Image (cartoon, rainbow, N blue to C red):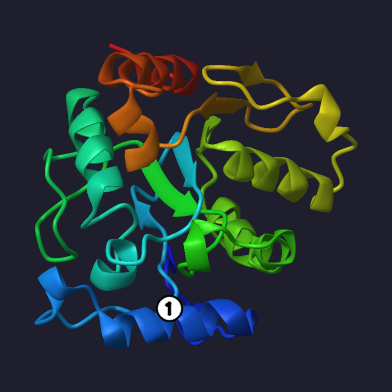
Amino acid sequence: MDAYPRELESCRRCPRLAEHREAVAITKRRAYRHDIYWGKPVPGFGDPDAAILLLGLAPGAHGSNRTGRMFTGDASGDFLYPALHRAGLASQARSTGRGDGMSLKGLWITAAARCVPPGNKPTRQEVATCRDWLEHDVGQLPSVRVVLALGSIAHDSYLELLKARGVALKKSRFPFGHAALHRVGDAAPLLDSYHVSFQNTNTGRLTEAMFDAVLQKAKELAGLAR
């Protein structure tokens, strides 16, 4: 699988995002002032034979935009990877960087937007422009049996991808809701979860137990449950 095509590595289709990702990589956060930031679009990561596609929002400014791996190096990853490890989907509970030995089993992680957006809020047009890269990943994952969307933007992004593929649907019939399951024609069903952002996990809106239950549901849908 070509997870990081040259066209993605050099992508500047969204000037606002390209400028922001590079500016963050130069100014850095004080705690990481000695790190060399990735500062480029972040590729998908995981098992090419994945039965579960985990779809996030966008790279974190000092997480993925620094490390070059989805959900790695920030509070979101500190919540996500231990949960994936408990579920048997990740080889280890801690994800620190691309050379840490992390591997995923039965799971591929990607995002609706591949570049860190200002304020963690990509515009609808930016997400639409990035849809080609979501299509790139989905098109190379023939074994996916369920899509787990983290947050409403990821939820909408998958539905828009299906529409672009010619699936007739009205998004209003598939409202986002934590643990909600949506079956859309013959496509891989869509399972929702609140995002694993620090804002959600720190306030208790999303707890470990809640997320573990969603992962278990995803595994059952994907035929991975023990």
Q: Position of residue 135 (x, y in %)?
A: 64, 58
What quarter of the picture does the N terminus occupy? bottom left
Going by the image, does 80 lie left or right of 95? right
Q: 170 or 2, which lies in front?
A: 170
Q: Position of residue 206 (x, y in %)?
A: 38, 24
> Quick one: label 1, few (<14), some, or many (20+) residues within 10 Å?
many
Question: Which of the 4 image quadrants contains residue 62?
Answer: bottom left
* Residue drawn at 42 percent across, 72 percent down: 4
Q: Quadrant of residue 36?
A: bottom left
**Residue at the disc numbered 1:** 21
Q: Can residue 6 be spotted in the picture?
A: no
Residue at 54% of width from left, 76% of height from top? 17
Front in this rendered view, residue 136 or 42: 42
Seen from the viewer's position, the closer of residues 116 and 112 is 116
In the displayed structure image, the side of residue 83 where residue 161 appears, left or right? right
Type of the residue with mark 1: Arg
Total number of numbered discs in the rendering: 1
